[in-house]
Amino acid sequence: MNLSNLYIEKILVEFIKNETSRVGISNAVIGLSGGIDSAVSAYLSVKALGKENVKGLLMPFKTSSSGSLSDAMKVVDDLGIAFKKIEITDVINSIVKSIGDENISRIRKGNLMARVRMILLYD
């Protein structure tokens, strides 16, 4: 890692420390998708808050890639953080059924998944 990367990492870790402290928060829940964005968020949060104060939340849908789930678990294992897995398939299927459009587009279904995941993260 070169100096500019270390400097950026330090700025981001300090930002997380300062912002959480400013609003009186000492814990973080990170939605782990198996992607780079959520992995970076988890690593930075652990550096800022400590692994005991960071929890990973995995929220797969039935068509989620098994690779994504295993990548998310690699982050959990590497960081040694607590985690919870909540399947969102039944919730999404229930919403689709309530809408009454069984042929809902992938884009609309993806939007529903994003919102359900955000509800779970805020909860």
Image: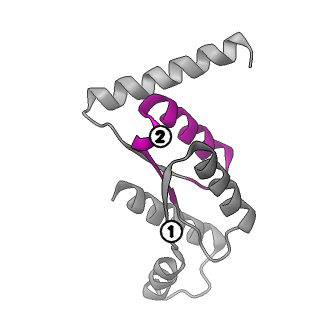
Q: Is residue 9 above or below residue 60?
A: above
Q: How is the image coloured?
A: one colour
- Residue depicted at 59% across the width and 46% down the height: 38
Residue 6: x and y in percent read: 64, 16
Q: Amino acid at mark 2?
A: Lys
- Residue depicted at 40% across the width and 42% down the height: 53
Any mark on residue 42, and which?
none
Circle 1 Cα neighbour tier, 10 Å, few/some/many (<14 / 14–19 / ≥20): some
Helix or strand or loop: what does disc 1 sit on?
A: helix
Q: Quadrant of residue 49?
A: top left
Seen in the image, is 65 located left or right of residue 118?
right
Helix or strand or loop: what does disc 2 sit on?
A: helix
Which region is colored magenta?
32-57
Q: Which residue is mark 2?
A: 51
Q: Is residue 14 above or below residue 44?
A: above
Q: Amino acid at mark 1?
A: Leu
Residue 58: x and y in percent read: 54, 61
Q: Quadrant of residue 41?
A: top right
Q: Which residue is mark 1?
A: 112
